[in-house]
């Protein structure tokens, strides 16, 4: 349905991806209508729609939603919502924004998913390609909608696209040249009826339309990813141990690449500037893609070595009196905190909490006992965190993020780390994890030296 001129298209959701999809449909000659069940929509989003004379409704889904040829749904709309169920009952085709944008993509699409590491890997991929002389765009779940940039992409250019399970739930013909699956651990089970298999299946949709001209890059050290059935062609593993087949791995601080029974040493892990074992996987995924594109080893490693990281992901904000303040606000699940706690060899004062998504803290219990000096519990999950950890470690419930940062500053010693790594969503206290991270940084900057 790439010729949408004159078609009536409903877009569900009036935030980033929804507004971008509406703008794209308008540019392509369709008649968009935006509907959002929330009555508290960002004024800037509605202003954009007004300026383009795009009709919309908020606080309700009326019958006009279904007077269309196609529905584009935003990732924030649950698949089992009444509005999507009604659309299915009426035989109206429902697709995600990334599916819609992909119809008009001329460039090489690199789609990256996983429970953790998506943002860092996608950002690193875009950075490396641009540093290596390839024009690459950054888009997707990272905050820049695919629909916003897709018409700018030319045939010899690349799109590094961060893709969530919610975006993959409603794809049809979405077909990336490179599909990357970093890891899969329980997350968002509130959206998947507490069924982990549903969540896993959503992640693997990223490769469902690939053929023998495409590539799948996957983490073979991740049990769930490695055990999921995969095609036997065009699959490249990443691992921190020696690989028997195609892919990239690390051995004795050296990076190797296997391709069709030929192994080459790409370089040393000293070129990897990002902290932590998890970032070695992220780097290997990008190195694998760059090798398959045909970029030289020296050029790849030079590009990787200049990447400084992603905001709100293990971001060093400031060192005050020898105390490191680290913003890991993007850590919205327990697995992310597990990686964060393994990234430091110093005692940690951990700020934990927010909107719980069914968290199982047993995954980090041993790491907390060995690496964490104290927990400051905040948000609606504070009592749950206190009850779980109180017999293992000092835990204090505080009524705000600001109060926890100030208290941690008072109690931390030189050579220790104050780490915001919440393991929870931000929506009980903040608009999003970015705002939470910005508040953390603002408070840190205000602390007297």
Image (cartoon, grey):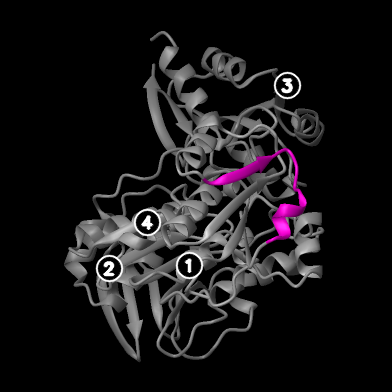
Q: How crowded is mark 4: few (under 14 residues within 10 Å), some or many (20 or more)?
A: some
Local SS, label 4:
helix
Q: Nearer the viewer, mark 2 or mark 3?
A: 2
Residue bearing mark 1? 5
In magenta, the rendered stretch is 54-67
Q: Which of marks 2 and 1 is in front?
A: 1
Residue bearing mark 2? 154
Q: Which of marks 1 and 3 is in front?
A: 1
N-terminal of the pair, mark 2 or mark 1, is: 1
Asked if residue 321 is positioned above or below residue 73 in the image, the reply reads above
Question: What whole-number distance in Å separates the C-alpha atoms at marks 4 and 1?
Answer: 19 Å
Question: What whole-number distance in Å separates the C-alpha atoms at marks 4 and 2?
Answer: 11 Å
Asked if residue 438 is positioned above or below residue 332 in the image, the reply reads above
Q: Does the magenta stretch include residue 66?
A: yes
Local SS, label 2:
loop
N-terminal of the pair, mark 1 or mark 3, is: 1
Residue at (33%, 77%) from the top-left corner?
Answer: 257
Using the image as rendered, state which of residue 436 and residue 183 is in the foreground: 436
Asked if residue 375 is positioned above or below residue 171 in the image, the reply reads above
Q: Nearer the viewer, mark 3 or mark 4?
A: 4
Residue at (44%, 90%) from the top-left corner?
Answer: 212
N-terminal of the pair, mark 4 or mark 1, is: 1
Question: What whole-number distance in Å separates the C-alpha atoms at marks 2 and 3?
Answer: 52 Å
N-terminal of the pair, mark 3 or mark 4, is: 4
Residue at (65%, 60%) from the top-left corner?
Answer: 185
Percent coordinates x, y for residue 143 in the rendering: 47, 47
Q: Residues within 10 Å of mark 3 (few under 14, many from 20)?
A: some
């Amino acid at each position: 349905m790439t010729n949408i001129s004159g078609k009536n298209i409903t877009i569900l959701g009036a935030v980033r991806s929804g507004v971008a999809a509406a703008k794209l449909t308008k540019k392509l000659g369709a008649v968009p209508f935006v509907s959002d069940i929330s009555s508290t929509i960002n004024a800037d989003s509605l202003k954009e729609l007004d300026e383009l004379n795009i009709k919309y409704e908020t606080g309700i889904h009326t019958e006009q939603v279904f007077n269309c040829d196609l529905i584009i749904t935003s990732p924030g709309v649950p698949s089992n919502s009444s509005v999507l169920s009604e659309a299915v009952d009426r035989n109206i085709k429902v697709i995600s924004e990334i599916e819609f944008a992909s119809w008009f993509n001329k460039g090489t699409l690199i789609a990256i998913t996983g429970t953790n590491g998506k943002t860092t890997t996608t950002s690193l991929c875009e950075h490396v390609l641009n540093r290596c002389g390839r024009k690459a765009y950054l888009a997707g779940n990272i905050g820049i909608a695919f629909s916003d940039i897709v018409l700018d992409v030319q045939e010899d250019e690349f799109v590094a696209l961060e893709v969530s399970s919610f975006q993959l739930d409603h794809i049809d013909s979405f077909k990336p040249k490179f599909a990357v699956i970093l890891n899969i651990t329980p997350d968002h089970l509130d959206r998947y009826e507490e069924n982990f298999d549903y969540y896993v299946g959503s992640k693997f949709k990223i490769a469902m339309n690939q053929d023998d001209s495409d590539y799948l890059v996957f983490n073979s050290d991740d049990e769930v990813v490695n055990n999921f059935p995969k095609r036997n062609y065009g699959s490249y593993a990443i691992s921190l141990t020696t690989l028997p087949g195609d892919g990239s791995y690390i051995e004795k601080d050296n990076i190797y690449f296997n391709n069709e029974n030929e192994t080459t040493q790409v370089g040393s892990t000293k070129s990897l500037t990002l902290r932590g074992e998890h970032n070695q996987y992220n780097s290997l995924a990008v190195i694998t893609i760059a090798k398959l594109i045909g970029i030289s080893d020296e050029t790849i490693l030079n590009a990787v070595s200049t990447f400084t990281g992603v905001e709100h992901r293990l971001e060093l904000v400031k060192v005050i009196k020898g105390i490191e303040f680290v913003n890991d606000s993007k850590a919205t699940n327990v697995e992310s905190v597990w990686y964060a706690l393994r990234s430091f060899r110093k005692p940690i004062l951990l700020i934990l909490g927010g909107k719980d998504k069914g968290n199982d803290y047993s995954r980090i219990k041993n790491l907390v006992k060995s690496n964490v000096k104290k927990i400051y519990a905040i948000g609606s999950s504070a009592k749950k965190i206190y009850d779980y950890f109180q017999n293992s470690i000092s835990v204090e419930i505080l009524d705000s993020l600001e109060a926890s940062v100030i208290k941690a500053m008072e109690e931390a010693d030189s050579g220790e780390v104050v780490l915001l790594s919440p393991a929870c969503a931000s929506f009980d206290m903040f608009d999003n994890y970015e705002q939470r991270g910005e508040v953390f940084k603002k408070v840190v900057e205000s602390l007297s030296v």
